Structures are given as structure tokens and as C-alpha cells.
Image (spheres, coloured by chain):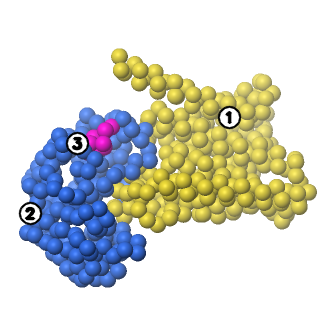
Chain colours: A blue, B yellow
Amino acid sequence: MSAEAVLDLEHVTLAHGTRRVLEDATLVLPPGSVTLLRGCNGAGKTTLLRAMLGLTTPNAGRIRVLGRTPRAARRRIGYLPQSLTLPAPRLTGRALVTSARHGARFGVPGVGGRCRAAVREALALVEAENLADQPLATLSGGERQRIGLAAALVDAPDLLLLDEPLAALDVQRQAALTEMLERLHQTRHLPLVLSVHGASPLDRLATHEVVLEDGHIVTRG
Amino acid sequence: MLAFDFMRHAFLAVTLVGLLCGVTGWFLVLRGQAFAGHALSHIAFTGAAGAMLLGCPPLSGMALTAALAGVVLGWEPPGDTARAPDRQRGRDTATGLLLAASLGCGALFLQWANAASSSATLLLFGNILGVDRLTLILLCGLTILCLGALAVIARPLLFATLAPDLAAARGVALRGVSVGFMVIVAVSSAACAEVTGVLLVFSLLTGPAATMLRLGLSPWPGLAGAASLAVLLGWAGLALSWWSDAPVSFWISALAALAYLLAVAANSFHRRFRTF
């Protein structure tokens, strides 16, 4: 587990297009925390997650993630977007997870033993070994979510960001994914930042809650 | 058949073109950019026509215009990757407009150069049986250059193709990778079109790659399969053309389509077989 604060916002103003979603926000999320980002549609949850990854630049203020700038920290972050865009549905989940393992570095895609072992481990963590060799097109939303989670975990991240991870799942699969995330947090001491829309099964995991409302942050420990 | 120099050169040329088109085509089809590949080879035709008008070697015009078009077509608009379908539509529209405009310019250049029909035929259908030693050396150099460049960007390119949002989150420069890849495709198309003609380049770029992807092969077997199939199609096209007197491009494009249909049938049979 990293000893640095998961997130440190200092007077941050963030905009989505022309609309300001966060105004002069200051916030610190402690190491090892599980934080729920709660807010209605368009409240800026995804924009804040994207800012943590360095994909959106704040209009004002300073963002530190794991003690670094977002761009420096993002290789230590696992990320699962709200809906995983999969332009190559005929390839398998294993190809996706393997690519996520070394895709940020230049060179020829590797098929070495260490890479294969890391992919196997990530798939095992999310109990997706039996799905790994099926084309992505044949997987259900929940199964794709598990493959996406394996891709987020394959490089042993120090922080996991999940954007509305339960949004497309039925009640049974929501419970299963919640249990999986709880196990990941407990066994790997992995800090989590999870965006949610309303009341969610993820509530019971949370050590912190950040509510985004009219461009302001309301925090509850 | 192989007793003749021109046939040996032709076999070597389709081997190089097959390797290059098979590998670049696999990424191109995987990224859903087959139309851009088609457009690039036709834009290269316009460049060749422009070069002829200026009295320069056609290959120089082809490579330059195709590379410039590659930068334009590969330029990813900024923003959220979750809006991929909208972006794909916008990209296809831009590609279509660029293709139409460049073909119009190509026709105009050929008219100004007083070289309309015979030169256009040569550029569109190539002259695989007229490949000389110098062209082979040039083609070999460009094949090594393009495959080398592709090897450098292969990991981020594959990641950006399979999961653009995850790749962006991990710091992959989507725009840089996209532009780099399209320039490689452009130079490959130009190099191959000089030898085989723009129509045949498109067959070799898309046919073998689409066949391998239809079979659901993972990246390494898919890449190797696409390159091997492209080379085999080239060899078979040359041999059948020798015996039948029909154009090489006819045989290669027909065999590429047949290979794809067989892959569709095999895939469908495999699915049905699994359900029983």
C-alpha cells in the first residue's frame, strides 16, 4: 500500500466543456481509503476521475495523486471506465489483458513467461480465467466488466479508479462485484475511488464519501 | 514459369508486398480503418499523377501525398473516447470527402499531363510483371522501414486499438500512435501501389487481415496468419495468371474474397458445432 495521500486537491476548479463542475475545491483522501464519489448525472464524477488520470487539466488549482502530478502517477493507477469501449470484439479477453500489461511501453507485444503469469494472476483475481479465451463480443456486460477489471489490475496498480462500476449490472452481479472489490481491498490493501450515482451496494465498503453538488464538495468520513 | 527473370522478380515483389500489407492490414482492419486504407491508396494515385505532371518519379508523389493524407486521417480529435461511434462516423465522412477531392485532382493532373488513360491504368492496376531489380531493392528497403516502425509502436497501437479509454488512462498518446500508424500505412500503400497498383494493395491490405480476424485469432497468430495468407495469395495470383492469362489483380482480389468467405463459413460451422 502506498503511504501517500490517494488524492490531494488544492483549490481546484474543473470544467466539462464550458460548464464548471468543480469550483475552488480542496480535499485530501488518506492512504488506503475506499472513497465513494457520489453525485447526480453531470455532477462531474467522471471529470474528476479523468483529472486524476491527467486526461483533463484543471482550470485552476493543483491536483496530486499518490503524491505526484496526475500524469506522473497514472502508470500506478488502474482504471475501469463507465462503459468499456471495445472496438475489436472478435479478440479475446486475454488479448486485452495482455495488451494492458505492456501497452504503455514501446516495442513488440510480448509473450514472455512473466507477462503470461501476470495476466493469469489478474484474471484469477477477478475469477475470469474461464472467460479469458472467449471473444469479447460473446461476453455479457458483467463478464466484460470483469475482464476490464483484470486489465486495470494486471500491472499491479497502487490505486484503483472505477467509474460507476455497477451501473450496467443486475442485482446479483452487483453483489458479486462488490464482494470482489472488498476482497481486493482487504487482501491487497488497494485504495479504491469509486463513483456512484445513488445508493449503492458499494456503500458498505466506503471509508470516505465525497458528494459532488452544484460544483462543490461535501465530504463525509 | 520461374525460368524468366520478370517472373522471379514478380514473385519476390508480391512476397514483400504481401508481408507488408498483411501486417499493416491486420492493424488497419482491427482498428476499423479499412476505408481509410482504401482512401490512402487512391490518394497515393493522385500524388503519382501530380508527380507525373511535374516530371518527378511517380513514387515520390505517391509517398508524399499518402503520408500527408495519413497525418490528416490519423489525427484523432481530442475528447472522451467513450464517444467512439460519433468519432468513427465523423472520421469516415472526412475520409470520404478527402478521397473524392483527391481523385478529382488526380483526374485533372492526368489530363494536364496529357497522360490520361494509359498512365491511369498503370497506376490503378500496377505492373507486377515489369518490376526491375532497382524497384525490388527500393521495395525491400521500404518494407524493412515500415515493419521496423510498426514494431516500435506495436504495443501502444494494439492497446489503443483494443481499449482506447484504458490506453489513454495509462498515458498512451492516442493521437501520436494514430498518426504514426496512418503514416506507416500511407508509405506502405504508396510503396506497394507502385508495384501492384492501388486496387491490388487494397485487396492485400484488407482480405487476409479480415480473414484472420474473422477466425478470431489472437494478435501473434493473427499477424503471422495475415502476412502468410497475403504472401500465399500473391503467389497463387501470379501462378494462376501465368496459366490462365487473366490479370494477376483479378486472381488476387478474387482469392482474397474467397478466403474471407471460407473464414465466415468456418466460423459459422464452428459456432453451430459448439451448440450441439
Q: Report the residue at 55% width, 50% height from top.
A: B33
Residue B253: mark = 1
Viewer can see residue B132 = no
Q: Residue at x 32, y 83 (%)?
A: A60
Q: Position of residue A71 (x, y in %)?
A: 32, 71
Q: Chain of mark 1?
A: B
Residue assigned mark 2: A207
Q: Could you tell which of marks 2 and 3 lies nearer the N-terminus?
A: 3
Q: Main secondary structure of the magenta part?
A: helix
Relative to B88, say whether A144 is above or below: above
Along the line of sight, the residue nearer the viewer: B199 or B141: B199
Circle 2 residues within 10 Å: few <14, some 14–19, many ≥20? some
Magenta span has B85?
Answer: no
Which secondary structure lies at badge 3? Answer: loop
Magenta segment: A139-146
Residue located beneath label 3 in the image: A170
Residue type pointed to by label 2: Thr
* Residue that appears at 83% across and 60% down: B109
Above or below for B258 versus A95: above
Q: Is residue A158 left or right of residue B18?
A: left
Q: In the image, what residue type sits under mark 1?
A: Ser
Q: Chain of mark 3?
A: A
Where residue B9 sits: x, y (%)? 73, 40
Front-lying residue, A154 or A148: A148
Percent across and percent down for residue A141 are 30, 42
Residues tagged by mark 3 and mark 1 found on one chain of the structure: no
